[in-house]
Amino acid sequence: ASHPTDDPLALMALCEELARAAGEHVRERTVDRGGVARTKSSAVDVVTAVDTESEALLRERIARARPDDAVLGEEEGGTAGTSGLTWVVDPIDGTVNFLYGIPSYAVSVAVVRGEPRPGEWTQIAGCVHSVAVGSTWTAARGYGAWRDGERLALREGPPLAEALVGTGFSYTADKRGRQGEVVARMLPHVRDIRRIGAAAIDLCLVADGRLDAYYEHGLNPWDVAAGSLVVTEAGGVVEGLDGGPPAHGTTVAGAAELVRELAALLRTLDAADV
Ligand code: IPD
Ligand code: CA
Ligand code: CA
Ligand code: CA
């Protein structure tokens, strides 16, 4: 029996094909602020019909192209496979931006080997397609990262005091309050803060050098599966607060030296237990 390829570049091409196909659908389907289909973990954790449709489209195409692979998606959860590979998909990252017509939202598609969790997985390939802007980032393990076909190479970061730092906030009220306090205490130590609203795009902007660093507490696998591979394949690091893998706590991304400085600041600001 012919086994589908595990080649990172071939899988990257498929990630891109899938992300663009779902992106095409998202682009055709605008909703307004009345388009909230339901809420999830809290009243601010919204889902639109388009999130669901985009994930259905991704799952259908994955099943057709890679019937033996598992799938983990934000809206439908996990589906088992037999190949050891899992497709980790965020059908719309930046749903709130999508709902308000702010053009920072993306389809994120990655394929990983092993448990589909940061620290346990081996990311093979990924694509983040920024639907409204039209930018597409791709990465393949061992081969590099690209934006619209142009090879990315992260430069050394500035000192923390001159760093533009992206972050994001969880959907649960008590966590958001604590995260806001951490941001307030961080602000005097950095150039400025950005809350762009789509974790996958934040990571790609770090890989681009358009953000110097990014951190967030409590991200899910689908938020980071593609974007963090784009960062590491561009030459950056993605770590937890203690320098190990991000796991369930805080994810910090950027050039190695700056990530160490930012993680040290976050530890003193007590972000670890947010
Ligand atoms: C969210 C966005 C947001 C981040 C949240 C994520 P969603 O994903 O990436 O920027 O701060 O932590 O949950 O719900 O829009 O896919
Ligand atoms: Ca969501
Ligand atoms: Ca997301
Ligand atoms: Ca999402």
Image: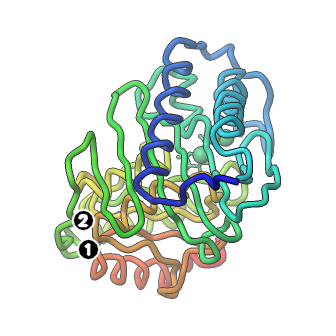
Q: Quadrant of the C terminus?
A: bottom right
- Badge 2 density bin: few <14, some 14–19, many ≥20, Cα 10 Å: many
- The location of residue 224, given as percent across then percent down, is 53, 57
Asked if ligand 1 lies within 8 A of label 1, the reply is: no
User: What label does residue 163 carry, if any?
Assistant: 2
- Badge 1 density bin: few <14, some 14–19, many ≥20, Cα 10 Å: many
Q: Looking at this view, is 75 or 69 the one in front?
A: 69
- The location of residue 137, given as percent across then percent down, is 35, 46
Q: Is residue 179 left or right of residue 233?
A: right
Residue name at image x 31 percent, y 79 percent: 256
Picture layout, residue 224 above or below residue 252: above
- The location of residue 72, given as percent across then percent down, is 72, 51
Badge 2 vs badge 1, beta-carbon distance below 8 Å = yes
Say which element carries label 1. helix
According to the image, label 1 marks what residue? 160
Q: Amino acid at mark 2?
A: Ala
Residue name at image x 44 percent, y 72 percent: 238
Which picture quadrant has residue 84? bottom right
Say which element carries label 2. loop
Q: Looking at this view, is 121 or 75 the one in front?
A: 121
**What's the CA distance linking mark 2 and mark 1?**
5 Å
- The location of residue 46, given as percent across then percent down, is 71, 33
Residue name at image x 43 percent, y 37 percent: 129
Q: Looking at this view, is 48 or 14 the one in front?
A: 14
